[in-house]
């Protein structure tokens, strides 16, 4: 028996397998957009054929971080902003795992902004979901990196003097090979994008618009939305980086003008993932490193045999 | 210490090849059958500035730098020769000669490069030389190098000159040069080596007594630094993942691992910052690979947060912390032992971590292995605390010391077979954090294992890993995690990881931790030779602390002097805190000028402490016992 027999198991996956048997402590408010992410994610899992034992979901801190309490799999609810470095190392250690990282806009674009930029440029084969509700929720309503300029909160009583982060453009220029935006108010599009993102071989970034009915009072802030891949009003090629960048810029500007443009903005299927790049230059084994620790026949090299001669 | 030991110092500018030349010099002496020990001094600068390395060599094992030195090879700082008048490097021209004279012993030998250095620029040079019976050999090394090869080869000319003066067989150097140099530079270097050697023998009348003694080893030796032994310990213990960000002096371990791991099918990652580095190590460990990360003081400060997560989530990981003088950026290239409290207590909440501090280059290998055994055996983070001194100094160690079987054992993990019988909660969820764990250790499942999925969280959690704020659960989990440290203490007590020095019975004690161990050991021997009754202990376990061993040691002596490289006596404080007594027995000898102790400073400090006097030495501080 392999050490990781759950990986690649050939059977029908039921999305209910991803529902915890114990109800998590109520942490998401009624009407929270996070429920939309959860629903879409559960629907996507059977389509990609992955079971809870082969999925590693790494989250940050905040309401979004509680996704692990609602979603059954190997979960790692970590620390504020640090989901990406944990997730990408797990993927390097065992590339056969389905690795998903998730966090909020404060978590992902604020405290974890540095990691976002670097994980995107390295193009790790994983999916990164950012719950973007333009507010700090769990800490009770402070201005976030995606809050519009002028946004007033208890910590920004005069209104924010800062322009918001543009996550799609940032992901694109940093080097993400799949960039999309979807919204919790449309779980069908969300599910499709999640399936694509997980099947994509490289870093897939999804800016997931989630309404916050408690701190951003308008629970329907992302309605009506337009799917730019379906709409006749938009004609661009998501495999062309320049066109994708122009479309992403427009979508990000439009959001603050009340028009919600969603869809896949950029897809680069040709670019090698980070693991593939590392394998190509001889910096990473072909077989999952993690398997080796369970392989009784593996012959472990000693420093003594390989390196001691140079010190004699 | 024997009468005929050599303490050779090579001085020049950073970037002039001082480190590589001294490394070859030390290796040549080791191959000639001597025991060697090096001490490095360098500024935080890429090129230029005053830098030196000392090589101490003897027929007996050498455990420390010496007191001063007795042979100087002053090569000059080639980067000090800035053609523009008054430029930044302008006033540093004679430093490689002038800066080293204060520590040169009586009767010492000086070789200096007249091509770069002018002794006339040093006030009273001739008078001082006469007064101290120094034997001076001015040689235009630069010109020799230019004529027979290239100017940068003046190091080789210098080695040829000192080899002639000290009577070292050139074959050792030739052999080393052939191993490390490409053909086109090997030939001119060999020519320079021989030319200078022969020229010095012919042209100078040798007035000095210093000669390299004859020695031999009974078994094969290797010359390694603490950074080497830490890396090799990790590799032999099955570590195949490292993540880091460069910071002196931790960079050395990181570099060695980064070069070694791809050859072993492992993975090394240089990442955006130290928070990411430690987080990556956690991620790889969680996915089932033995992992490490590390940094020096300032970078380790950033790791505080993932370190706490490792404790709460019981994710095993090894972090190394290479201390340099602080606070903040401190002295980037100089040693200090002032991060002890930082490493023991950083991060929020009560600490459940292992902290080990190796005392010698050789011991760093065992402690590195031990750190992994404890981390993975008990699902707890382990920190290997060392400093710039151990990291960078070279010592000869018998090659057989490293001839151990690899140990890739992943420690407290389940297999899929075991998972079937493991405790599961309602709905079949694996109880990763079960209450009734033996020694507090609840084995983990690795992602991908069938039936093992569970939740890791930095929040307090119940057996299944779910966030849980129930007071009873909280108390149970806190106590279980803390109980692992008791179990580790018992495990370590059986291994006796502390190092004892001197006689079993003695009136006084010397206590130290980390890199000062070898120097204290030499001081203990010298004190006993001088008629004092002294024993010493080098403590390696910082957390959990060896309470029983230290109580026994302190009960057996009248007074004890704690030797450490910081200004606040952090290790003395830890000892008093852990033992809760002996405050009236413990005094401190402290040094925090950026240089490690010399053995004589400890001897002087000890004698002053038992006589109740101030230490006459200007660079060390004595702090008397103050009670509990």
Image (spheres, helix red, strand yellow):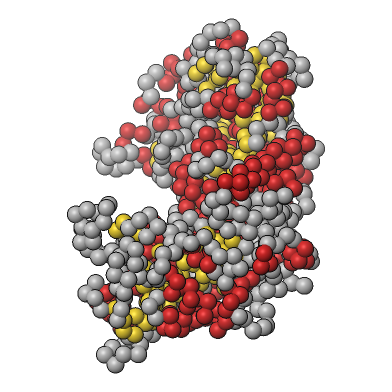
Residue B68 vs residue B618: left or right?
right
Where B411 sits versus B623, above or below? below
User: Where residue A97 sits in the image (x, y, percent)?
Assistant: 60, 71
Q: Quadrant of the C terminus of chain B?
A: top right
Q: Is residue A162 left or right of residue B17?
A: left
Counting from the top left corner in percent of width and height, residue B242 is at: 58, 56
Please say whether residue B269 is visible from this viewpoint.
no
> Is the residue A234 above or below the residue A143 in the image?
below
Q: Residue at position x 52%, y 42% from top?
A: B349
Q: Nearer the viewer, residue B621 or B188?
A: B621
Q: Nearer the viewer, residue A224 or B207?
A: A224
Q: Nearer the viewer, residue A189 or A129?
A: A189
Going by the image, does B558 lie left or right of A232?
right
Picture coordinates of residue B77, whole percent (x, y): 41, 38
The residue furthest bottom is A232
Location of the N terminus of chain B (image quadrant): top right
Query: How many labels, in total?
Result: 0
Is residue B82 visible in the rendered image? The answer is: yes
What residue is drawn where x is 35% and y is 67%? A212
Residue ID at (68%, 19%): B554
Q: Is residue A79 above or below residue B98?
A: below
């Amino acid at each position: 028996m392999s050490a990781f027999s759950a990986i690649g198991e050939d059977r029908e996956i039921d999305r209910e397998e991803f529902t915890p048997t114990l109800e998590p402590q109520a942490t998401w408010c009624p009407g929270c957009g996070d429920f939309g992410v959860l629903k879409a994610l559960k629907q996507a899992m059977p389509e990609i054929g992955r079971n809870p034992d082969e999925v590693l979901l790494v989250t940050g801190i905040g309401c979004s971080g509680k996704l692990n309490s609602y979603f059954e799999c190997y979960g790692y609810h970590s620390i504020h902003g640090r989901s990406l470095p944990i997730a990408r190392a797990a993927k390097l250690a065992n590339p056969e795992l389905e690795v998903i990282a998730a966090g909020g806009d404060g978590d992902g674009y604020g405290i974890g902004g540095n990691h976002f930029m670097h994980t995107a440029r390295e193009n790790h084969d994983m999916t990164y979901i950012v719950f973007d509700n333009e507010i700090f929720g769990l800490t009770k309503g402070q201005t976030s990196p995606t809050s519009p300029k002028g946004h007033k909160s208890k910590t920004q009583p005069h209104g924010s003097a800062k322009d918001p982060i543009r996550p799609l453009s940032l992901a694109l220029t940093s080097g993400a090979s799949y960039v999309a935006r979807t919204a919790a108010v449309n779980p069908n599009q969300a599910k499709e994008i999640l399936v694509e993102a997980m099947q994509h071989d490289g870093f897939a970034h999804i800016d997931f618009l989630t309404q916050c009915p408690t701190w951003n009072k308008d629970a329907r802030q992302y309605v009506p939305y337009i799917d730019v891949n379906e709409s006749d009003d938009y004609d661009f090629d998501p495999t062309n980086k320049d066109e994708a960048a122009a479309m992403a810029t427009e979508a990000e500007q439009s959001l603050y003008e009340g028009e919600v443009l969603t869809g896949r903005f950029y897809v680069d299927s040709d670019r090698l993932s980070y693991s593939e790049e590392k394998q190509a230059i001889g910096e990473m084994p072909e077989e999952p490193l993690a398997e080796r620790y369970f392989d009784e026949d593996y012959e472990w090299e000693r420093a003594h045999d390989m390196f001691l001669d140079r010190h004699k | 210490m024997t009468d005929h030991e050599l303490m050779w110092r090579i001085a020049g500018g950073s970037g002039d090849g001082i480190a590589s030349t001294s490394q070859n010099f030390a290796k040549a002496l080791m191959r000639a059958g001597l025991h060697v020990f090096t001490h490095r001094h360098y500024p935080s600068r890429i090129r230029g500035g005053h830098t030196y390395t000392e090589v101490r060599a003897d027929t007996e094992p050498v455990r420390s730098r010496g007191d001063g030195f007795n042979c100087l090879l002053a090569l000059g700082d080639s980067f000090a020769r800035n053609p523009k008048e008054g430029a930044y490097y302008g006033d540093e021209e004679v430093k490689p000669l002038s800066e080293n004279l204060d520590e040169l012993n009586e009767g010492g030998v000086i070789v200096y490069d007249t091509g770069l250095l002018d002794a006339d620029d040093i006030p009273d040079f001739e008078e001082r030389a006469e007064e101290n019976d120094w034997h001076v050999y001015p040689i235009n090394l630069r010109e020799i190098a230019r004529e027979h090869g290239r100017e940068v080869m003046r190091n080789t000319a210098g080695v040829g000159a000192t080899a002639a003066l000290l009577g070292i067989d050139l074959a050792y150097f030739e052999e080393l040069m052939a191993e490390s140099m490409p053909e086109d530079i090997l030939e001119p270097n060999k020519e320079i080596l021989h030319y200078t050697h022969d020229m010095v023998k012919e042209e100078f009348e040798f007035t000095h007594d210093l000669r390299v003694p004859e020695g031999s080893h009974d078994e094969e030796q290797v010359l390694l630094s603490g950074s080497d032994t830490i890396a090799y310990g990790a590799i032999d213990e099955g570590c195949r993942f490292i993540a880091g960000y460069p910071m002196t002096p931790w960079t050395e371990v990181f570099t060695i691992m980064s070069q070694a791991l791809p050859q072993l099918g492992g993975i090394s990652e240089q990442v955006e910052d130290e928070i990411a580095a430690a987080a990556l190590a956690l991620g790889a460990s969680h996915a089932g690979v033995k992992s490490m990360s590390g940094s020096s003081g300032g970078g380790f400060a950033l790791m505080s947060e993932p370190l706490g997560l490792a404790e709460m989530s019981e994710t095993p990981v090894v972090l190394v912390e290479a201390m340099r003088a602080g606070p903040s950026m401190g002295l980037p290239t100089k040693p200090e032992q002032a991060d002890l409290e930082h490493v023991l207590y950083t991060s929020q909440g009560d600490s459940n971590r292992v902290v080990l501090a190796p005392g010698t280059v050789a011991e760093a290998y065992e402690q590195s292995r031990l750190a992994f055994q404890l981390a993975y055996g008990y699902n707890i983070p382990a920190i290997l605390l060392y400093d710039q001194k151990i990291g960078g100094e070279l010592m000869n160690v018998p090659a057989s010391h490293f001839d151990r079987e690899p140990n890739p054992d992943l420690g407290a993990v389940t297999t899929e077979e075991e998972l079937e019988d493991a405790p599961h909660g309602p709905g079949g969820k694996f109880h990763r954090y079960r209450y009734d764990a033996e020694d507090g250790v609840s084995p983990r499942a690795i992602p991908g294992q069938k039936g093992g999925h569970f939740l890791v969280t930095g929040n307090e959690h119940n057996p299944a890993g779910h966030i849980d704020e129930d007071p009873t659960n909280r108390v149970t989990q806190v106590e279980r995690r803390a109980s692992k440290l008791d179990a580790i203490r018992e495990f370590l007590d059986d291994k006796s990881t502390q190092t004892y020095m001197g006689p079993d019975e003695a009136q006084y004690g010397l206590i130290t931790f980390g890199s000062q161990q070898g120097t204290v050991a030499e001081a203990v021997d010298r004190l006993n030779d001088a008629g004092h009754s002294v024993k010493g202990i080098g403590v390696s376990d910082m957390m959990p602390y060896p309470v029983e061993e230290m109580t026994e040691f302190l009960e057996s002596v009248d007074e004890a002097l704690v030797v450490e490289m910081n200004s606040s006596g952090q290790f003395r404080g830890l000892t008093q805190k852990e033992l809760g007594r002996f405050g009236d027995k413990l005094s401190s000898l402290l040094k925090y000028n950026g240089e490690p102790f010399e053995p004589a400073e400890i001897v002087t400090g000890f004698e002053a402490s038992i006589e109740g006097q101030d230490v006459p030495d200007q660079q060390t501080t004595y702090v008397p016992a103050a009670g509990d």
